[in-house]
Image (spheres, rainbow, N blue to C red):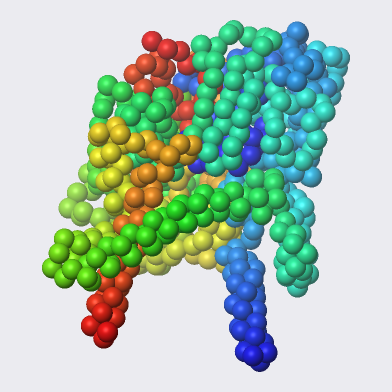
Amino acid sequence: MAEDVDLLEPCMSTQSTIGAALLQNISETLTYLDVGGCGGLQPKLAESREQLPDGSWRFELRQGVTFSDGTPFDARDVKHSFDRVMSDQITCEAKRYFGGMTVSAGVVDDHAIDFKADPVQPILPLLSLDLIVPEGTPIEFTRAPVGTGPYVLRDWTPGQQIVLAEREGYWGDKPAVSETTYLFRTDPAVRAAMIAAGEADIAPSIAAPDATNPGRLLVSGQRGDLYQPGSLDAADQRPARAQGAEHGHRSRGVHRHPAARRHAAGDRAVPAALLGLERGGAVPEIRPRGRQTAAGGSRGRWRAGRYQDDAGGTPRQLPQPHRGDGGDPAAAARGGFSVDLQFYEIAEFQKLYSKPYPTDRGPMMATAMHDNSKGDPSFTMFFKYASEGLQSGISDPKADDLIARASAATGEGCARLWSELQAYLHDDVVADVLLFHSVRFVRVAPRLEWRPNMSTTLSLPLGGIAFK
Amino acid sequence: MSSFIRKRAFANLVSLLGPVVMVFFLSRLTGDSASLFLPVDATEQMREEFRQLHGFNDPLLTQFGRHVWDPLHLDFGASIRRARPAIDVVLEAFVWTLQLAVITMTLVAVAVIVVGLLAAFRAGGLCDRIAPLTSLIGASGPDFWVAIVAFVVFSVGLGWLTTSGTGTVWHRILPIAVLFIRPFGLIVQAVRGSMISALSSA
């Protein structure tokens, strides 16, 4: 692992290092998301679910399941786990997905529980994040997790290692891996070398230059995307389409291909959407954006022509909050823009980049990276493109409708609706300019029968690993 | 003597208080603690609860009072991120750092005295040739680069030593060897110079 684990707290398992140790290993969820396919939610501790007439969801729980401390699992554990996440006495990161709604859990009987959202909205994917802890777990953060999963925490030496061991009495299939040691090495070269030296079996996040052995290396799909939302003016009261048109003009002026080409050989690839390659990210309906690719003649990533037309031929000041790989001011100047490149600390950047947007500034482009490691479009698309999304720069009824319908759909309809939404956002709304996908490399020892996927950055279910 | 002690005590108090004051105010200049700590997509309600829970809503002077008063009672607080006493987190890392530093500096002290003395006694001898060479290497070879090359050669290439970790004496050889080079190179030259001047003045 690239980082030491701070906690082994189930409600913080959205942090990648914590999730890698806990998720589906020590602790389990009611359902889990079929990353890589459009199979939707699969049963885990909940055997089935149904939507009730009032919009709430009823889960029928698996019977005969016990926690690693021997206590039986029932609906009160589920309620306690959920209430713990929502408590104001600890800061659980999973809580952030429940913004703008009140969700309550009601125990029906020992093996059934209802979840009700007010206002009614698709909460099903969100509930798959909640790791179940026993009812007796105190509200404060724990460092000794107890769960229903196939493994127990055998040893934790902070800063050095975590050892998980298979436990007796697990309700599911017996895993092939009986014991796992997590070691923490911050240097990617060291992690890669540990596989070569036979000291470890899986090394996540190694650097592209270390990806020298295609036989042993697997690309874990896309991890993050750099994108540049257009003007995020909260004060802009024009109709959404007009705002979209301005976004279109502006972003057509941005070259993405020189940057993408520059990076494509390393750990980046040209994106079609803000989602992963594995889940609806490769969208055939999206047309190549000719004006972006054909804006030859300038090596820069900015061209002012279209933007100047839109703004009456007067180059405007374009302050740009800059995080990571931002624009090139010299290239922008060659293109006729007057760019004021600004650097921000993360907390300051958040004020400009998340709602409520400041109203006392002009047009602005932000360069940001988005990580959709959970692999579910519901998280990303609502957050970035819905009218109510915390970091959305658009308000478009059609996009809102597509997001709502795609979030609720499963199977074929799910893939089709997400594709339609992505094509619409890319071709018509031009909500942002996708610059590149980051590709994460994982080195895997030859003795393992295992392939990483996009969620490998967030979780590492040991039950899915086998030996050759 | 007592005025000397008073002066030194005052000087030390200033150098202790300086960082305490600076850490408090500088860490608040970099922005809202809730925004820095919580994920970027945290809701405003979560941020507010976080501020309330950890006392960031109190007046700045109250917070500063706690920041100064608590350590005076040997209460170093809890690490919010790790949910355990902050002092434990620091001491845990400190023990390893201290071990490496003590072992390395002991070895360096012995080696520089032996090599430095021999170099001074026998000008032009083997040790006298080694001393300037190691000085040059020690002064110009950055630790992090030497460390990477050493581990590529000895751990990955030859497979003699482990790439990382702790536990056995084999785990300590590479880090100590790398840490040894720089201070040895710098100090051996000083010992040799001092010894030559001491011998010539005798």
Number of numbered labels in the structure image = 0
Q: In this view, does A176 lie above or below A245?
A: above
Indicate the quadrant where residue A382 lies: top right
Query: Residue A67, position in %: x, y?
Result: 73, 18
Q: In this view, does A339 lie to the left or right of A152?
A: left
Indicate the quadrant where residue A7 lies: top right
Q: In this view, does A112 lie to the left or right of A271?
A: right
Query: Residue A251, position in %: x, y?
Result: 37, 49
| Identity of the residue drawn at 31% across and 42% down | B151
Query: Residue A431, position in %: x, y?
Result: 46, 44
| Identity of the residue drawn at 57% across and 32% down | A162
Res. A426 visible in picture? no
Res. A241 visible in picture? yes
Is A200 in front, or is A86? A200
Is A206 in front, or is A381? A206
Q: Is residue A142 above or below residue A131?
A: below
Residue lying at the far front of the rendered structure: B202
Query: Residue B191, position in %: x, y?
Result: 31, 71
Q: In this view, does A47 lie above or below B177?
A: above
Q: In this view, does B62 lie to the left or right of A224?
A: right
| Identity of the residue drawn at 59% across and 40% down | A158
| Identity of the residue drawn at 38% across and 10% down | A468
Residue lying at the far left of the rendered structure: B124
